[in-house]
Image: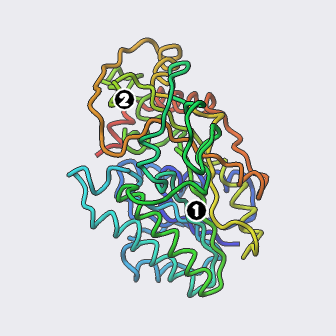
Amino acid sequence: MKILLTGACGFVGSTLAQTIVASGRPWTVIGFDNLCRPGSELNRARLQQLGIKLYHGDLRCQSDVDALPAVNWVVDCAANPSVLAGADGQTSSRQLMEHNLAGTINVLEKCKANKAGFVLLSTSRVYAIEPLAKLKVVVRQDAFEPDASATMPAGLSSQGIAETFSTAAPVSLYGASKIASEALALEYGATFDFPVWINRCGVLAGAGQFGRADQGIFAYWINAHLRRQPLRYIGFDGQGHQVRDCLQPRDLVPLLEKQFDAGLGKGQPKIINVAGGAGSVCSLRQLTAWCDRELGVHPVSSDPQPRPFDLPWVVLDSALATKTWGWKPATTTEQILKEIARHAEKNPDWLKLSTP
C-alpha cells in the first residue's frame, strides 16, 4: 500500500513518516512538501536517510500535485496552522486560503482521479470562538477548568469539546479554511465514491516540533525557558491559567491504520476528535512550574492585554474516537514534555533554526 503525506517535512508529517517506517508496517511512504518553513530541510534530510521518496512542490499548484505518483491513501498534513494567520498583519489572508483550502481541493482532485482515500488532519480551531470565550471557568491548581456550577454550552462537558459543539462563525480565518476543507472533502468522497476521514486534532506536540508561540507552544515554551529567553503570560489577567490538551502525533498511526482498513466505512462517523483530552491538560503556569523543576527557575513576565482568538480552555473530547476505533493516546503529557526538553538540550539553536 502506498501512502502520500502532504506537508511531509513539517513536524506532524515527518513524525508520521518516521513512525510508520519504524513500525515495520508494509506501507510505502511518499512525501510532498514545499519546504517553505524554517527547519523543514532538517526533516527532509532525516526522511531521505530512511529511504522515503520526497517530492518538492506546492499544493497550490495543481500541476505539481498531478505529477505525483498514484497512491492508495493521502494523509493531508499540510497547512498554515496558526490561528493568527491572515489576521496578524504579517501573513496574507489570501495566501492562507490558497494553502489551506485551494491546496486541499487540488489533493481531492488527485484522489478523485486515482480513487485514493483521503484523511484530513483538521483542528480544534473549527469550534466556535464566542461560546468558548464566554465559558465560565474557575482556577484550580494553577489552571482554568469549566465551572461545574454553570450551564455549559451544548456539546461541551468537563471531558472536553465534542464533535457536536458549534462550528458557527467566527472561528478565525484559519478555522474557516479547515471547516471549508472538511466540507469539500466529504462532498468529494460522497460524489466520487472514495473514502474520506476527518480527524480534528488537539494541540500536537513533541520533540522536533518547530518552536513558535502561535503554532508549537509547548516546544516554544520549553526551548525559550531553557535558553532563558523572555517569556510572557498574555491575556487572562496575565496569570498563565489558560489550558490546552496535548497529543504526540505518532499516536495517530494506529488510528490511521484502522481507517485505511475500513475503506469507505459505511455507517461510521466521518469526523472525530483526536486529542490528549482531559487527561493531558496543561496550563502555561503549570508548564512553567514543570520547566522550573526540570530546567531551573526562569521568571515569566505578565501581559494582561488579550490577543485575538485567545481562549481560556480548549480541550477535545475523543470519546467518539475511542468508541468507534478503540483509539486512545499512548503518550502522556509528562513523556511529551521530557522528550521536548531532551531535544532542546541537544539542539541549542532550535528556536533560531525553526523560526522566520
Q: Residue at x 44, y 32 (%)?
A: 347
Res 157 quadrant in image: top right
Report x, y in % for residue 83. 37, 50
Residue 290's place in the image compared with 206, above or below, is above
Q: Position of residue 334 (x, y in %)?
A: 62, 28
For this orientation, the residue located farthest to the left is 89
First of labels 1, 2 by sequence position: 1
Q: Is residue 290 above or below residue 34?
A: above
Amino acid on which disc 1 is placed? Ile
- The residue lying at 49 percent from left, 54 percent from top is 127
Which residue in the protein does label 1 denote? 52
Q: Secondary structure at mark 2?
A: helix
Q: Residues within 10 Å of mark 2 (few under 14, many from 20)?
A: some
Quadrant the N terminus occupies: bottom right
Instruction: Name the element at disc 1.
Output: loop
Q: Report, in whole angstroms, how far the alpha carbon at label 1 lies from the one at label 2.
A: 45 Å
Q: Residue at x 41, y 45 (%)?
A: 215
For label 1, count other residues whose C-alpha is less than 10 Å away and answer few (under 14), some (14-19) or many (20+): some
Asked if 227 appears above or below 79 in the picture, the reply is above
Image quadrant in which you'd find residue 177: bottom left
Could you say where residue 231 lies in the image, as x and y percent from the top left?
Answer: 33, 25
- Picture mark count: 2
Q: Position of residue 104 (x, y in %)?
A: 46, 72
Amino acid residing under circle 2: Phe
| Nearest the eye: 208 or 332 | 332
In this rendering, position of residue 95 left or right of residue 56:
left
Residue pointed to by mark 2: 236
Which dot, 1 or 2, sits closer to the camera? Answer: 2
